[in-house]
Amino acid sequence: MKKQKKKIIWLVLITGAIIGVAVIGYLFRPTSECVCNKKAVATLAATELLNQYETDEEKANSLYLGNVIAVEGIISSVESDDLNRAVVAFESQSFGTVSCTLCEKESEMEKLTEGTTVTIKGQCSGYTFDVVLVKCCLVN
Protein backbone atom coordinates (compact mmCIF):
# COMPACT_ATOMS: atom_id res chain seq x y z
CA MET A 1 0.00 0.00 0.00
CA LYS A 2 2.83 2.43 0.89
CA LYS A 3 4.72 1.63 -2.29
CA GLN A 4 1.63 2.30 -4.38
CA LYS A 5 1.16 5.74 -2.74
CA LYS A 6 4.80 6.61 -3.45
CA LYS A 7 4.40 5.57 -7.08
CA ILE A 8 1.28 7.72 -7.44
CA ILE A 9 3.00 10.71 -5.81
CA TRP A 10 6.03 10.35 -8.09
CA LEU A 11 3.81 9.97 -11.13
CA VAL A 12 1.89 13.14 -10.23
CA LEU A 13 5.12 15.08 -9.59
CA ILE A 14 6.73 13.97 -12.86
CA THR A 15 3.55 14.69 -14.83
CA GLY A 16 3.29 18.14 -13.20
CA ALA A 17 6.93 18.89 -14.02
CA ILE A 18 6.46 17.89 -17.66
CA ILE A 19 3.34 20.03 -17.96
CA GLY A 20 5.12 22.95 -16.25
CA VAL A 21 8.07 22.78 -18.63
CA ALA A 22 5.72 22.60 -21.63
CA VAL A 23 3.73 25.64 -20.45
CA ILE A 24 6.88 27.69 -19.78
CA GLY A 25 8.30 26.70 -23.17
CA TYR A 26 5.09 27.78 -24.86
CA LEU A 27 4.87 31.11 -23.03
CA PHE A 28 8.48 32.08 -23.67
CA ARG A 29 8.85 30.78 -27.21
CA PRO A 30 10.34 33.23 -29.67
CA THR A 31 7.83 34.68 -32.09
CA SER A 32 8.73 35.94 -35.50
CA GLU A 33 5.41 37.61 -36.13
CA CYS A 34 5.89 40.74 -38.17
CA VAL A 35 3.81 43.87 -37.85
CA CYS A 36 3.65 44.39 -41.61
CA ASN A 37 -0.12 43.95 -41.70
CA LYS A 38 -0.81 46.06 -38.62
CA LYS A 39 -1.66 49.74 -38.65
CA ALA A 40 0.78 52.12 -36.97
CA VAL A 41 -0.68 54.23 -34.15
CA ALA A 42 1.84 56.97 -34.92
CA THR A 43 4.30 58.02 -37.60
CA LEU A 44 7.23 60.22 -36.67
CA ALA A 45 10.87 60.96 -37.32
CA ALA A 46 13.35 58.69 -35.57
CA THR A 47 15.03 61.75 -34.00
CA GLU A 48 11.68 62.93 -32.62
CA LEU A 49 10.91 59.52 -31.10
CA LEU A 50 14.32 59.40 -29.44
CA ASN A 51 13.91 62.97 -28.19
CA GLN A 52 10.53 62.15 -26.64
CA TYR A 53 12.03 59.17 -24.77
CA GLU A 54 15.04 61.18 -23.58
CA THR A 55 12.81 64.04 -22.42
CA ASP A 56 10.06 62.06 -20.65
CA GLU A 57 10.37 58.28 -20.78
CA GLU A 58 7.19 57.67 -18.79
CA LYS A 59 5.07 59.78 -21.13
CA ALA A 60 6.68 58.24 -24.22
CA ASN A 61 6.03 54.75 -22.85
CA SER A 62 2.37 55.61 -22.34
CA LEU A 63 2.16 56.61 -26.01
CA TYR A 64 4.33 54.02 -27.72
CA LEU A 65 5.31 51.03 -25.55
CA GLY A 66 3.84 47.84 -27.01
CA ASN A 67 2.30 49.73 -29.91
CA VAL A 68 3.13 49.57 -33.59
CA ILE A 69 4.73 52.81 -34.79
CA ALA A 70 6.38 53.95 -38.02
CA VAL A 71 9.64 55.87 -37.87
CA GLU A 72 11.47 57.65 -40.65
CA GLY A 73 15.13 58.49 -40.63
CA ILE A 74 18.54 58.15 -42.18
CA ILE A 75 20.23 54.78 -41.69
CA SER A 76 23.47 55.11 -39.72
CA SER A 77 24.28 51.39 -39.58
CA VAL A 78 22.99 47.98 -40.56
CA GLU A 79 24.13 44.92 -38.65
CA SER A 80 23.03 41.33 -38.27
CA ASP A 81 21.81 39.78 -35.01
CA ASP A 82 22.34 36.20 -33.79
CA LEU A 83 19.38 34.99 -35.88
CA ASN A 84 20.73 36.70 -39.02
CA ARG A 85 18.03 39.39 -38.97
CA ALA A 86 18.93 42.92 -40.01
CA VAL A 87 19.19 45.46 -37.20
CA VAL A 88 18.93 49.04 -38.47
CA ALA A 89 20.09 52.03 -36.43
CA PHE A 90 19.03 55.55 -37.37
CA GLU A 91 21.24 58.65 -37.29
CA SER A 92 20.78 60.90 -34.28
CA GLN A 93 22.38 63.91 -32.64
CA SER A 94 22.22 62.11 -29.31
CA PHE A 95 24.18 59.37 -27.56
CA GLY A 96 21.34 56.89 -28.23
CA THR A 97 19.56 55.89 -31.40
CA VAL A 98 16.42 54.18 -32.63
CA SER A 99 17.23 50.51 -33.26
CA CYS A 100 14.93 48.38 -35.43
CA THR A 101 15.18 44.59 -35.70
CA LEU A 102 13.53 43.46 -38.90
CA CYS A 103 11.57 40.24 -39.04
CA GLU A 104 13.09 37.35 -40.95
CA LYS A 105 11.26 37.90 -44.21
CA GLU A 106 12.34 41.55 -44.23
CA SER A 107 16.01 40.97 -43.45
CA GLU A 108 17.46 41.45 -46.91
CA MET A 109 20.42 43.53 -45.82
CA GLU A 110 21.48 44.45 -49.34
CA LYS A 111 18.38 46.68 -49.59
CA LEU A 112 19.55 48.67 -46.57
CA THR A 113 22.49 51.02 -46.99
CA GLU A 114 23.94 53.66 -44.71
CA GLY A 115 22.85 57.19 -45.56
CA THR A 116 19.54 56.09 -47.09
CA THR A 117 16.29 57.55 -45.78
CA VAL A 118 13.75 54.84 -44.96
CA THR A 119 10.53 54.36 -43.04
CA ILE A 120 10.34 51.31 -40.81
CA LYS A 121 7.29 50.09 -38.93
CA GLY A 122 7.71 48.05 -35.76
CA GLN A 123 6.51 47.34 -32.25
CA CYS A 124 8.08 49.57 -29.62
CA SER A 125 9.61 47.48 -26.85
CA GLY A 126 10.98 50.36 -24.80
CA TYR A 127 14.01 52.45 -24.10
CA THR A 128 17.42 51.69 -22.64
CA PHE A 129 19.99 53.98 -24.21
CA ASP A 130 18.24 53.32 -27.51
CA VAL A 131 14.58 53.18 -28.45
CA VAL A 132 14.04 49.57 -29.51
CA LEU A 133 11.57 48.47 -32.18
CA VAL A 134 11.05 44.76 -32.90
CA LYS A 135 9.12 42.70 -35.47
CA CYS A 136 9.85 45.45 -37.98
CA CYS A 137 9.25 45.76 -41.68
CA LEU A 138 10.11 48.32 -44.33
CA VAL A 139 7.30 50.65 -45.36
CA ASN A 140 7.06 51.21 -49.12
Image (spheres, rainbow, N blue to C red):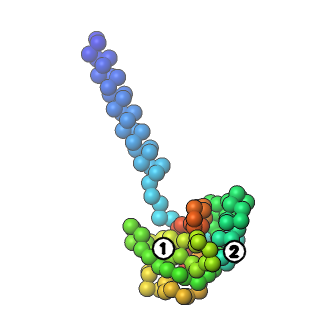
Q: Name the one closer to the observer, 10 or 112.
A: 112
Q: At x 63% / y 67%, what residue is drawn?
A: 68
In the rendered image, the residue lying farthest to the left is 3
Q: At x 70% / y 68%, what residue is drawn?
A: 52
Q: At x 36% / y 29%, what residue is drawn?
A: 13
Report whether 33 appears left or right of 127. Answer: left
Where residue 121 appears, x then y in whole percent? 60, 73
Residue 73: which disc? none
If the image is split into quadrants, where does the C terminus sit? bottom right
Where residue 46 appears, x then y in whole percent? 64, 76
Report whether 62 appears left or right of 73. Answer: right
Q: Counting other residues with Cα less than 10 Å from the Cα at mark 2, is it few (<14), some (14-19), or many (20 or more)?
A: some
Residue 48: which disc? 2
Residue 76 seen in this snapshot: yes
Q: Which is more N-terminal, label 1 or label 2?
A: 2
2 and 1 marks in contact (CB < 8 Å): no
Quarter location, residue 20: top left
If the image is split into quadrants, where does the N terminus sit? top left
Residue 119 seen in this snapshot: no
Q: What element carries label 1?
A: strand
Q: Name the one closer to the observer, 54 or 82.
A: 54
Residue at label 1? 87
Q: At x 49% / y 86%, what residue is drawn?
A: 113
Identified by mark 1, the residue type is Val
Identified by mark 2, the residue type is Glu
Q: Nearer the viewer, mark 2 or mark 1?
A: 2
Calculate the distance from the C-alpha at mark 2 to the C-alpha at mark 1. 20 Å
Q: Is mark 2 on a helix, strand or loop?
A: helix
Quarter location, residue 36: bottom right
Q: Counting other residues with Cα less than 10 Å from the Cα at mark 1, is it few (<14), some (14-19), or many (20 or more)?
A: many
Whether residue 100 is situated above or below residue 72 in the rendered picture: above
Report whether 123 appears left or right of 52. Answer: left
